Image (cartoon, helix red, strand yellow):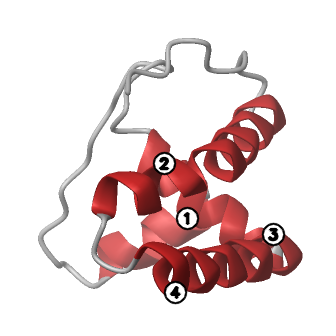
Amino acid sequence: MRFEDVSRLLALRLPLRCLTCEARSYDWLLPALRDWLTQHPDVARAYDLLKVKLAAVYGNDMPRYTGGKASLLRRTVDDARRSKGLPEEHDWNE
């Protein structure tokens, strides 16, 4: 978050929750993925299309649906990490 954004938020006097996490923490994963997809609409569209396709093929079989997204999500998270100067994630626990 940029300093200007933080200053505007503080001026509103709303309660804020600030989190810090290690570079390898999975707390970092979801915001990084969200931000990358927001900044790269072509990747977001590919992700959306993949989810629709997997849902049609696997229905309520969540392990297979989730497994079908793994490769794209790994590439996307690694791209996001590299953009922040972080190494690729090599410890994907499944």
Mark 1 to mark 3 CA distance (whole Å): 11 Å
Task: Label 4: state its secondary structure.
Answer: helix
Q: Marks 2/4: CA distance?
A: 14 Å
Q: Amino acid at mark 1?
A: Arg
Asked whether the residues under the numbered discs 3 and 2 touch, taking CB atoms below 8 Å apart as contact, a structural biologist would say no
- 7 left or right, relative to 52: left
Q: Residue at x 45, y 68 (%)?
A: 7
How would you rate the neighbour count of disc 4 (Cα within 10 Å): few for under 14, some for 14-19, many for 20 or more? few
Earlier residue among tags 1 and 4: 1
Give the left or right position of residue 65, taking residue 74 as reference.
left
Residue visible at 73% across and 43% down in the picture = 80
Q: Which residue is mark 2?
A: 67
Q: Is residue 1 visible?
A: no
State the CA–CA distance, disc 4 to disc 3.
Answer: 20 Å
| Element type where label 2 sits in the image | helix
First of labels 2, 4 by sequence position: 4
Check disc 1 and report the residue beneath it: 34
